[in-house]
Amino acid sequence: MKKEENKNGVSLFSQSDYLIDKDPIEEIFALNLGDFVAENLISEDLARKIGASVKDKKAGLIKQLKELISIYSLQNTLCVLSFDNNEKQAIFTSIAQSIQKMLDIDSCDIYIEKSGELELIGATSSKASKKYLIDEKSPIGKAFLSREIIFENVIAVPMHCNIRSVGVIVINDNSIKKEYIDLVESIGTLFATSLTLQDNIDDANKLISDESASVADLQHMRAELTALIGDLCDYQQAFVEYLANAVDKKGQYTVSHSKNTAKLAKLICKQLGLNEKTTDLIYYSGLLLNIGKIALPEKMFATNGKLSKEELNKIQEHSNLGVHLLMKINFLSEVVPYITYQKERYDGSGCPEGLKGQSIPFGSRIVAVADAYCAMTSDRPYRKAMSVNDAIKVIKSEAGSKWDPVVVEALINVVK
């Protein structure tokens, strides 16, 4: 943990300024707020509001809990999905269907712990068992108890966070690649953390309304919410990276294309002097630019021969499939416009809307150039990689038609 300083070098979170009765627990909380500011989870103003000292320690803790709850709920910026208990079955069925399509497998089932048993809550198979006991007799029970992936007649992937296990994702295919298993594991951790955080927020709201709640109870709840919000941010980043790796594997890239595109886009942003938040959004857009490929059969990318018209159309439409998937995930909503319009062309000849020049989101223009360069300079099943000079020559010749000339110039300055 670290202290955060403002532009004048003054500590934002220190014992003298923000502690209630100089409690060491308050020091830890203040330093956590400093981390939140450093990681762009909250603004300095909101951090000051949360950390402001008050005479009544209990009232201060209640105020801090309310502000922490607002961080998670405000515009859904940290939410994975917004749903209540009545919608859980529909949500998890959708997740199971998405996993099935991404991995191109026969079925995927999701079990959630309820009353000491694992109940089926999302399924793509009509033959899935409705319940499992939480014991060592089944791979599903083993995965839940051990918090480890179990490989038996199925692949049982635990859904857990640092606080608890919440369920198990069951993959009915033992032949899937490691990259896809890593992705499913990250999905399990992400949703387990989100579910736990939502449950804790419900408990926090009850605690806030309980006049008999003690200071210790309020402090404990605050510590859990602070830790879970921090964990959720980390797991979201891990999920994006695993998703990008799986996309690259599905697309038959011999190198980490998504990561290379994202890194190059970030360098272009710095060359252009863009601010940190915009740069981060464009970086994530680069990672997820080809996300729609995760929903297409892997065999479609494995051929060295000519693709059929139908297969070509499916690949060309992959960005639309990807946007549909991303729109189900609230915390990724800000990158959707950059991905939606990445096939627009500077002269207006692109799709989906034929946007022209400055009408195309700047992030889309940057990632499109980075993607084209990285694709040209990488080996593909149907061709060898171009040299740096040849790739630059092609991209430069298309500046003003396909690509933004300003972005092309920045690219040249970065890669040469």
Image: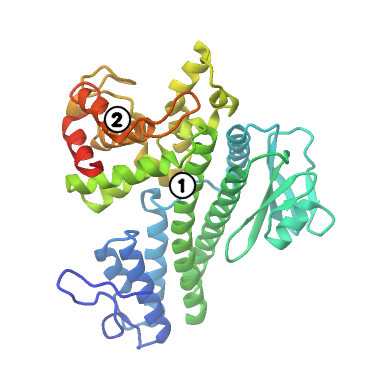
Q: Quadrant of the N terminus?
A: bottom left
In the image, which disc is placed on residue 10?
Answer: none
Q: Quadrant of the C terminus?
A: top left
Marks 2 and 1 sit apart, C-alpha to C-alpha, by 28 Å
Assign a secondary structure to mark 2. Answer: helix
Dot 1 crowding, Cα within 10 Å, few <14, some 14–19, many 20+? many
Q: Residue furthest top?
A: 309
- Residue that appears at 36% across and 43% down: 262
27 vs 353: above or below: below
199, 241: nearer the viewer: 241
Where does label 1 land, which residue? 240
Where does label 2 land, which residue? 391
Residue 209 in the image: x percent, y percent?
48, 68
Residue 269 in the image: x percent, y percent?
23, 45
- Residue that appears at 52% across and 59% down: 197
411 vs 315: above or below: below
Q: Residue furthest bottom?
A: 22
